[in-house]
Amino acid sequence: MSESSVSTLRDTLLRLSNSIANSLATTPYTSHKTSNISVKAFLEPLLTSTNSTINASIKDFALACALLSSSTHANSEFLSWIPDHLSSLATASFFRLSQAYLTVFDDRNSQKVEEFGLDCNLVPVHKRLLLELLPEVLPFLKDGIKESAIDKSEESDEFSAASARIPIGFAILAAHQLRWFITQIDYPH
């Protein structure tokens, strides 16, 4: 892995992120009437990540793509504003990044995929980055769901948020992202 190949990967990530961010910026958005979160504002920093490491930037990009891509199959008012072309762009962009990623980190990725007990030759190229990201994003999304989840107190019949500072809408978004990541994995043939 050379510094120029990492730079090329970073340029590819930036180009793909900008394409989605530009499409997102021109997409009309009205906040969900019962929520105090803005899904669009939630997505924007994930696409304009200025993380110092390429891995953190890729994770943020993947989380944005997961949320946008999940809107195709979601019946949620939080995601109903996302047009099909933006969802498709996010899916295609993630898979393009996955291919570019493998040109730089193929050996590392092969090792991580094999840690799952999978043969890299049987895993489609466009899903190998996704597999590598799973151990990092699944706990992150699970924590996001738990932070704003509604708990029923065992001591009473009252419901309360696990953390009063975190709106429930963030748990819904994390659940959609989690669902997208999980549904991308199929049994290797």
Image: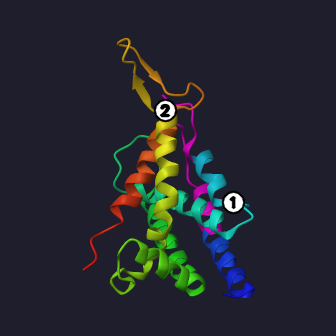
Task: Say whether residue 11 is visible.
Answer: yes
Please name the residue that numbered disc 2 is placed on: 168
In the rendered image, which quarter contains the N terminus? bottom right
Identified at 50% across, 70% down, the residue is 94
Q: Nearer the viewer, residue 156 or 11?
A: 156
Location of residue 105 by image quarter: bottom right
Q: How many marks?
A: 2
- Disc 1 crowd rating (10 Å Cα; few below 14, some 14-19, many 20+) is some
Do labels 1 and 2 touch, CB within 8 Å?
Answer: no
- Element type where label 1 sits in the image: loop
Q: Amino acid at mark 1?
A: Ser
Can you give x and y, in whole percent of width and height, for residue 160 in the image?
A: 46, 21
Dot label at residue 49: 1
- Of the pair 91 and 158, the residue shown nearer to us: 158
Q: Position of residue 182 (x, y in %)?
A: 36, 59
Provide the residue span drawn in magenta: 17-39
> Which residue is drawn at the image coordinates 64% and 62% (left, top)?
56
Q: Amino acid at mark 2?
A: Ile
Q: Earlier in the sequence, mark 1 or mark 2?
A: 1
Residue 30, by quadrant, is: top right
